[in-house]
Amino acid sequence: MPAKNVIDGDNETMKRGEGVTYGRGTGRPNPVDVHVGARVRLRRTLLGMSQEKLGEAIGLTFQQVQKYERGANRIGSSRLFDLSRVLDVPIGFFFDEMPADVAARSPAQSRGLAEEPVNYELDPMAKRETLELVRAYYKIADPSTRKRLFELTKALGAAAAKES
């Protein structure tokens, strides 16, 4: 039976993505691929790297990098490994902060084939907020100002730890 492209016309169903098939031949990228591509773009831009430079580093054209970042093309495991090394992040970074509704719309999830999710604490070093904070911190040119900010941050963290 061919993949289902058409849904029953119920607008609420269309908004939630129920009854919609994603993947090859459907014209719709898998939401997980879109999320992973967005994480590639996030990390690349946080590093100040162009699509062209990233492509050169992993042996692709910038157009292919664009397709990965949009989720139009799926990133294979060996390419994901290469990206994690070039972008200096663990492979899990690409899946961090994935909204539950995105994970639920993956085809395996919708067919009931997925395993129960494992609850784990995200590594704070892989969070976007941390990366942005570190990047902003190192933009402070004056070493004494940077050191004062560092000491203030440590003091606030210690005070918060005592309160909890």
Image (tube, rainbow, N blue to C red):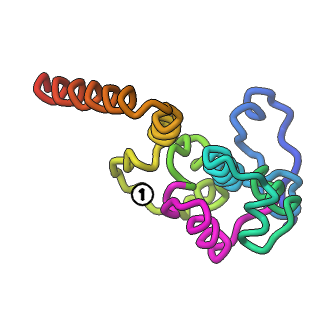
**Looking at the rendering, which quadrant does residue 65 occupy?**
bottom right
Give SS at disc 1. loop
Asked if residue 75 lies left or right of residue 102, the reply is right
Give me the residue at 24% from left, 32% from top.
154
- In the image shown, does 85 or 101 lie closer to the viewer? 85
Give me the residue at 57% from left, 55% from top.
94
Give me the residue at 88% from left, 59% from top.
63
Give me the residue at 83% from left, 57% from top.
67
Residue 156 visible, this angle = yes
Rate crowding at label 1 as few (under 14), some (14 to 19) or many (20 or more) other CA atoms within 10 Å.
few
Q: Horizontal and vertical percent for residue 23? A: 78, 59
Q: Horizontal and vertical percent for residue 51? A: 79, 55
Instruction: Identify the residue under disc 1.
Output: 116
Compared with 90, 122 (above or below) is above
**Looking at the rendering, which quadrant does residue 159 occupy?**
top left
- In the image shown, does 23 or 110 lie closer to the viewer? 23
Query: What is the magenta range?
Result: 73-93
Q: Tell me the amino acid under the disc marked 1.
A: Glu
Q: Is residue 77 magenta?
A: yes
Asked if residue 146 lies left or right of residue 94, the reply is left
Q: Main secondary structure of the magenta part?
A: helix
